[in-house]
Image: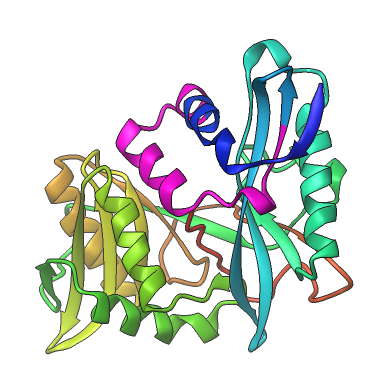
Amino acid sequence: MIVRRMQPADREQAERLWIDIFGDTESFTHWFFAERFSPETSFAAFDGDRLAAMTLGRETKILVEGKEHRALLISGVSTLSEYRGRGLMHTLVSAQTEDAKDKGFSCCYLHPVRESLYSSLGFKTGTETLTVCSDPNRNNAVFTIREGTDVACMRAVYNTLLPLYNGMQIRDEAEIRALLSDYGADGFRMLTAYTEDRPIGYMIILDDGTVSELFAICANAYVALLDEAAKYAGHEIEAIVPTDCGLKGERHYGIQYLVFNDAFDLPLKNGFCRLTY
């Protein structure tokens, strides 16, 4: 078994492995590897010429206590079924995180399937999130909900919340447009809540009813968007929101971090990180 940094030529096998393991559509997978694949921060294990396992990484910036940090977003950690149980995940993520440390990153972060999955590698839970549900009996008449993609509204809401929650990714206009291209690969609907003409919240809901993002400046805007999206989906929906959003829901672990050189402390005070692949 050969463990090495990935190369652009590995993309075809990596796309097949992604689809096999995660079940995503070909359109999203092609978009992801065209726009987000960074071989220089990704590692893989090969059995001869065959890709057996991989872990992908993409450089981002996050804001913690008003300070920008270089952060490596880890995703796509996957192993072919016949190669599982050999410690390949541990080997690859270890190589990836050591490389990130050498490159001067402040941290690596990810959203694990299980909270304990990466603890042996030093990852610790840094943020918690809340899962909340729609409610058809609520009265949301105070807000106007409009449909349509609006980058300026997204930026206005996101940038208002950015300094309030530690660990959020810093997004410029190019990042937001790339994000919308991501969602567009599988089809999406964007809803924005307004009070008068001021945007105070937005939601991205995919064609299958999955909520990819929900950000709002007040609790009432959260519920208005949730309930409007449920009407679109035709059934109850749930979304991940900050723990202080003012709603009742199920609290659970969110993002895990491996912090280098004491760049910041865990858990993050008032932390809420959204993964953007």
The magenta stretch spans residue 26: yes
The magenta stretch spans residue 142: no
State the residue in front, 240 or 119: 119
Query: Residue 182 at x, y = what percent?
Result: 34, 53
Q: Is residue 13 left or right of residue 146?
A: right
The residue at the point 67 percent across, 41 percent down is 6
Q: Is residue 217 visible?
A: no
On screen, 216 above or below 235?
below
The residue at the point 36 percent across, 78 percent down is 173
Q: Is residue 192 left or right of residue 119?
A: left
What secondary structure is the magenta-colored segment mainly? helix
Query: Residue 59 at x, y = what percent?
Result: 61, 63
Q: Which residues are magenta?
A: 18-44
State the residue in front, 49 or 268: 49
Query: Residue 239 at x, y = what percent?
Result: 38, 53
State the residue in front, 160 or 58: 58
How was this image coloured?
rainbow
Query: Residue 119 at x, y = what percent?
Result: 81, 45
Q: Is residue 43 left or right of residue 11?
A: right
On screen, 264 above or below 114?
below
Residue farthest toward the top in the current orientation of the protein: 82
The residue at the point 36 percent across, 63 percent down is 178
On screen, 14 above or below 202?
above
State the residue in front, 12 or 238: 12
The image shows a total of numbered marks equal to 0
The residue at the point 49 percent across, 53 percent down is 36
